[in-house]
Image (cartoon, rainbow, N blue to C red):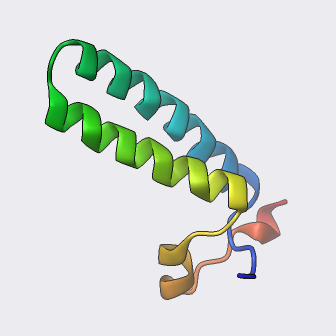
Amino acid sequence: METKNVGGRDRLARALLAALLTVVAISTLRKGKRMTGLLALVGALGFGFNATTCFCGLNKTLGIDTTSDE
């Protein structure tokens, strides 16, 4: 299992972004804007995954660890 590298305010921000992007995705998909809606949905899933698992591959690549914020 990967080491946790997302915590504290970073985790909260990612969860809020996931919720916001979900709303954007639903709204734009209802308006028939498929590409924008799908991109927002992918972003929501990515941020949601990061917030849930407390792991971010980009953070690992860049050597960033925000778990000390907790």
Please state if 13 lies on the left or on the right of 28 as rendered.
right
Quarter placement of the C terminus:
bottom right
Residue 23, position as x, y percentages in the image: 43, 22
Please state if 66 lies on the left or on the right of 61 as rendered.
right
| Residue under the image location 70 percent in, 52 percent down | 52
| Residue under the image location 26 percent in, 13 percent down | 30
Residue 46, position as x, y percentages in the image: 48, 54
- Name which quarter of the figure residue 3 lies in: bottom right
| Residue under the image location 57 percent in, 69 percent down | 56
Please state if 57 lies on the left or on the right of 26 as rendered.
right
Q: Residue furthest right?
A: 70
- Name which quarter of the figure residue 26 lies in: top left
The tally of labels here is 0
Quarter placement of the N terminus:
bottom right
- Name which quarter of the figure residue 13 lies in: top right
Q: Residue furthest top?
A: 31
Please state if 25 lies on the left or on the right of 67 as rendered.
left
Q: Is residue 58 placed above or below 62 in the rendered structure?
A: above
Q: Is residue 53 placed above or below 18 in the rendered structure?
A: below
Q: Is residue 36 placed above or below 43 in the rendered structure?
A: above
